[in-house]
Structures are given as C-alpha cells and as structure tokens.
Image (cartoon, helix red, strand yellow):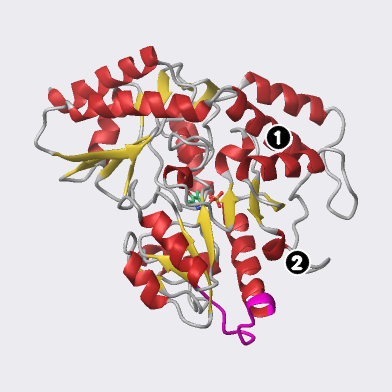
Amino acid sequence: MDYSAKDLMEMDDTYGAHNYKPLDVVLNKGEGVWVWDVEGNKYMDMLSSYSALNHGHRNPVIIKKMKEQLDKLTLTSRAFRNDQLPLFLKKVCEVTGMEMALPMNTGAEGVETALKATRKWGHKIKGIPENKAEIIAAANNFHGRTITIISLSTEEQYRDGFGPMTPGFPIVPYGNVKAIEEAINENTAGVLLEPIQGEGGIVVPPEGYLKEVKEICEKNNVLLIFDEIQSGLGRAGKLFAWQWENAKPDGIILGKALGGGVYPVSIFAASKEVLGVFNPGDHGSTFGGNPIAAAVGLAALNYLVEEDLPGKALTMGNYFMDKLRSLKNPVIKEVRGKGLLIGLELKEPARPYAEKLKEKGLLCKETHGVVIRFAPPLVITKDELDWAFEQVKEVFET
Ligand SMILES: *Cc1c(COP(=O)(O)O)cnc(C)c1O
C-alpha cells in the first residue's frame, strides 16, 4: 500500500528517536543534483548529505561499479583478504600522498582511528609516558558523535548528559596559531583540525594558519592530522582543502564523499611511521574495507580525478559566491567559503529561510543557527546554479 507523506512523517516520529529535526519533505528518488518527494515535487539538493553526495545522486559510474561488485563478492571481513581493497588502498595513498591507509565505514570511526593512531604513536614512538598523550583540537570543531569525539566538542548540546568525557584533549581557539604553540607540551602527540570548519558554520581560517600550524607541529615533533571528511574530495575547490596552503598533514581522515553517495566508506591515511604502530589485533572493523566499500571508494576517487570535480567546484563556487554577494538584503551578514562549500551568514535565525527556500524547490539546511549552507553536488552545471540563484533571490529580495 502507498503511504502519504503525512503517514510516513508520523511513522517516522513515532518509531524513530528524535535525534534529528528534518525538513518536512519525504524523498523517494534522486538523480544528479535533483531529488523528488513522494508527492512528485522536484527539488534541488543544496546540502548533498553534508558533502557525502559530491558525485551527485546515483552517479551512474559509481552505481555501475557497485552493481558489478554486488554480483561478485560483498563481505569477507578482514580475517580474509579480498581483491578490491588493495587497489583502493593504493589509490588512497596516491591521491593523498600518504604511505598507508586504514579503512573504516563512518567518518566518526575514521576520526577514532586517527586518534588511536596518534595516541599510540605518541606513546610508542615519541616516547610520551603511557596514558599521558594529549591531542589538541580546535573550538567549534565537528568530528563526529562517539563519546570520545564529543569529548573534544565545545558544543554544549553535543555533550550534555553523555559524560563522563574522555580526557586528554586540550581545546584552543580555531584560527589562532599562537594558541596552538602555547598548548603544546612534552606530552602533545598531535593536533587535530578541520582545514575549513563545516558544521561549525563554514569557517575558513585566516590565510597562512594551516601552514604555520604545520611548521609548529614539525618543530615540536607533533603530528598534524586534518579531518577532511567534509572539506576534502573536491568540495572546497581543491582535492583537499589543505592544498590551499600547501600544508600537507601527517595524517588525513576522509569519509562522506569517499562513499560516492551510495555507501559508508571512511579511511585514515598517514605515513608508515604513524600507521605502522598498529599490530594485528590492535584495531579493526568487521565491515571496514569490505569489497563493496573498496570498489565504491576506488570508483569515487577515480571519478573525482578524471572528471576534475575539484576544478568544477572552484569555478562554480566562485560564480555562485559572486552572485550571492550581489544580494541586497540587510539581514545578510556575510557570504564566505571555498569552492562549493559556501555559507551565507544572517543576522537572524536561518531556519525560516531554509523553509522558504524549500517552498521554492531548494533544499538547504541551516547550520549553527544563523548560517545557510550552500553545498550542492559538485556535478552541478552553470544553468542549474543560475536557477538556484533565482530562487535564493526571490526569497531574499522580495
Ligand atoms: C560529518 C563529519 C564527521 C563525521 O562523519 P560521520 O560519517 O557522520 O560519522 C567528522 N568530521 C567532519 C569534519 C564531518 O563533517
């Protein structure tokens, strides 16, 4: 039987925990930058599942690779080897410039893997006394939702009621090099940063920040780890956002778009010195590195490079930001971002504007209360962006 949108939303709210407050739109189809709801209304997806859909909905190349793999082999666990994972690992190392990689599923698991590797490197290689390793993180960060990861969050709601927290994560203001320099001590194993803060409201750090942090980390024998789960894989107009400052980190975490918009795939890539700390049995995941994930991840990386999605994001992002900056409405405070990771900051709550944009056929999500994020799939065309801007203009200028 067919359920109405109202039936489905009621069922959702009755049986599902209320840990999200989604826009009231029930989708059942997607293609490229477009999605459709159960009533047949068409919308442009301007959120891209928080940048997991850089390749667009149901990208035909990725769907094809996944279907081929579904017909061959789906899961082996890491107790056995499979013929897809080695190819994926090699590709990850090639594109990131790293030497080794450890596959997981969700972004949070990738971050946990990076934290474990960094701590263990600190204790076993750097020589920090056991249980003393510290990893410095930035205020206003978003790295995921596990108990350890929320321990480094400065968002009160993310932590409220979930204590006790995991110790060992000093927090410094984002964008301030001196604060990192001062927080480093002999027990510091690493610094974990987003090169652009995504959930924090599309915060681009001051120019030179990443590069200077890298120098300080090198000087102090501290690992620099970038969480590029959202900013990476073309989203910010480069394959990785660290490339804006040529600030290559010691380790990088990827997720979201690594799964090509179809499957959860994350990975932590680093040097041999860092990932070499893991011995058999130290860490793992039943589904991490499974043949579907590896085939999809490989296809996602190949597609990004071959279709130059970073270049497209840069051109289209600059084009759209220029248009947004031409909007005349005193409620607009700032337009900022890089590539197609764009934030429109308002002087008042953004949610009502997201609702109005939805009515115009543009699905956006407010972030940090007052910021509207524009982050369409990177396959978006100029005509599609023109259409999007017309809708934004109507909401903000009439
Ligand atoms: C989304 C995100 C994560 C967490 O990824 P999940 O797949 O939701 O666990 C971590 N870091 C950043 C920067 C993210 O944007």
Q: Nearer the viewer, residue 207 or 370?
A: 207
Numbered disc 2: secondary structure: loop
The amino acid at mark 1 is Leu
Q: Residue at x 52, y 62 (%)?
A: 224
Q: Which mark is residue 278?
A: 2
261 to 212, vertically: above or below = above
CA–CA distance between discs 2 and 1?
24 Å
Q: Which residue, as the protein is rendered here, is positioned at the far left?
A: 330
339 horizontally vs 392: left or right? right
The single residue placed furthest to the right in the displayed view is 80
Q: Which residue is mark 1?
A: 298
* Label whose residue precedes the other's in the sequence (2 or 1): 2
Query: Tag 1's secondary structure?
Result: helix
Q: Position of residue 140 (x, y in %)?
A: 35, 60
Q: Nearer the viewer, residue 218 or 27?
A: 218
How far across and down, in percent of the image, does residue 255 sit? 58, 46
Q: Residue furthest top?
A: 383
Say which quadrant the N terminus sits in.
Answer: top right
Span highlighted in magenta in the image: 124-135
Task: Respond yes or no on whether mark 1 lies under 8 Å from ligand 1.
Answer: no
In the displayed structure, would residue 126 be above or below residue 205?
below
Determine crowd level at label 1: few under 14, some 14-19, many 20+ residues with C-alpha closer than 10 A. Answer: many
Camera-nearest residue between 365 and 136: 136
Residue 35 in sight here? no
- Say which amino acid is labelled 2: Phe
Quadrant assignment for the C terminus: top left
- 10 Å neighbourhood of mark 2: few (<14), some, or many (≥20)? some
- Is there CB contact under 8 Å for labels 2 and 1? no
Judge whether residue 173 can be spotted in this image.
yes
Mark carried by residue 17? none
Is residue 321 one of those drawn in magenta? no
